[in-house]
């Protein structure tokens, strides 16, 4: 296997965690006799500073020609002004839209070795293993019209939550297909008691479910889902929902594991190209201090092997290395108060365990 990976380190701790992921990827590739080439590009706030835009046309072209994309994180206080005309997040939204990365997969799994790191009681997080599928290229983040204007003496703002049948149908099919390989249960989250877009969402999901008689479909309103994630997250298998609801719910669910630094994600389209990134932000307060937990980025690299390169054994090798490191007591500063490892030290342990697996 030969593959070209575009790396977008981004801002804050992004360069540190993507460097760790690249090192683990390269270690696994060499172990299994694959050849990976990496090409880095500016993206996000650092690209605004250097090029005036968060996503240049050159970077976009490189991403379109790649086998996979590895992303660190974007944003930070420097670019956070609400009045700014150019923001790092605009680059991320455009990249998703241009590449048609319509499905965001976010696994939320509680590692047994870290069960007491969760803010919830042990019995509430035991056996949690959820895969969220968030629709990523439509909904309120992309709907038009979108505007701010004055009406009389008042400034007003408008965002449009828009979905078409086809947009709902393709993410629903992926959710059911994914669940067939897991525990055969799909929970669709909407706000169908209030929103027309959610009523369409529910109608289409029910239609799609007819093609998967072996999978059980459940419906959950987004507000009650937020409650149930805290009360009984272990009840859920695959959860599929819209762009904004998925954004909020997955951040809520991420704390079940004990740290944002542990969780990966994959943004996929039809075909093999995907974008892989940890779900945490740029964490500018610890950037450059060697404190960042690389595990979320490393597990994103495992998803890259699985979904873009179709190398499941290599993905499982990385995931096993992470599990073994945590079982052996390896901890970064977000997971313990003492005897903690730097980003580089944790990366070194993971690479050794990949070779030993």
Image (cartoon, rainbow, N blue to C red):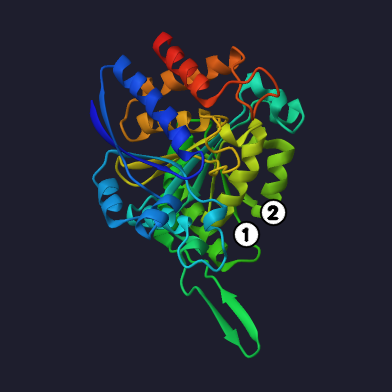
**Frontmost residue, 136 versus 73:** 73
Above or below 107: residue 150: below
For the residue carrying disc 2, how many other residues have a C-alpha within 10 Å: few (<14), some (14-19), or many (20+)?
few
> Which image quarter: residue 272?
top left
Give left or right: position of 248 versus 357. Answer: right
Q: Are marks 1 and 2 in contact (CB under 8 Å)?
A: yes
Whether residue 120 is visible here, answered yes or no, is yes
- Residue at horizontal 60 percent and vertical 36 percent from the top: 260
Distance from Cα at disc 1 to Cα at disc 2: 8 Å
Q: Check residue 47 in the rendering and tell me which mark sits there, or answer none.
A: none
Quick one: label 1 or label 2, which is nearer the N terminus?
1
> Which image quarter: residue 252?
top right
Q: How far from the left and from the top, in percent, is residue 83?
A: 55, 69
Residue pointed to by mark 1: 191
Q: How far from the left and from the top, in percent, is residue 66?
A: 26, 41
Whether residue 320 is visible here, answered yes or no, is no
Q: Secondary structure at mark 2?
A: helix
Above or below 104: residue 165: below
Q: Check residue 223 in the rendering and tell me which mark sits there, or answer none.
A: 2
- Residue at horizontal 37 percent and vertical 21 percent from the top: 314
């Amino acid at each position: 296997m030969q593959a070209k990976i575009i790396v977008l380190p981004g801002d804050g701790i992004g360069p540190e965690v993507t460097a760790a992921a690249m090192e683990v990827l390269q270690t696994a590739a060499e172990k299994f006799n694959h050849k990976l080439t990496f090409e880095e590009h500016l993206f996000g706030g650092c690209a605004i500073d250097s090029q005036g835009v968060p996503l240049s046309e050159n970077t976009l072209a490189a991403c379109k020609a790649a086998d996979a994309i590895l992303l660190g994180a974007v944003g930070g206080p420097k670019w956070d002004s609400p009045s700014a005309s150019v923001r790092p997040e605009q680059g991320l939204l455009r990249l998703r839209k241009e590449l048609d990365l319509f499905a965001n997969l976010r696994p939320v799994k509680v590692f047994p070795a870290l069960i007491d790191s969760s803010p919830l009681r042990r019995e509430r997080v035991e056996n949690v293993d959820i895969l969220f599928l968030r629709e990523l290229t439509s909904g309120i983040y992309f709907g038009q019209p979108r505007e701010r204007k004055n009406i009389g003496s008042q400034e007003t703002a408008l965002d449009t939550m828009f979905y078409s049948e086809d947009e709902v149908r393709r993410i629903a099919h992926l959710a059911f297909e994914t669940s067939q390989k897991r525990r055969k249960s799909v929970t669709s989250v909407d706000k169908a008691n209030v929103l027309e877009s959610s009523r369409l969402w529910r109608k289409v999901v029910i239609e799609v479910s007819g093609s998967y008689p072996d999978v059980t479909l459940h419906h959950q309103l987004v507000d009650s889902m937020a409650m149930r994630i805290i009360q009984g997250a272990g009840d859920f298998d695959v959860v599929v929902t819209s762009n904004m609801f998925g954004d909020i719910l997955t951040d809520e669910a991420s704390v079940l594991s004990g740290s944002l630094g542990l969780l990966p994600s994959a943004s996929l389209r039809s075909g093999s190209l995907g974008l892989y990134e940890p779900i945490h932000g740029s964490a500018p307060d610890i950037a450059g201090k060697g404190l960042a937990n690389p595990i979320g980025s490393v597990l994103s690299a495992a998803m890259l092997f699985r979904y873009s390169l179709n190398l499941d054994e290599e993905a499982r090798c990385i995931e096993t290395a992470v599990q073994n490191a945590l079982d052996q007591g390896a901890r970064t500063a977000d997971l313990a108060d003492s005897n903690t490892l730097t980003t580089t030290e944790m990366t070194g342990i993971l690479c050794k365990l990949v070779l030993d697996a």
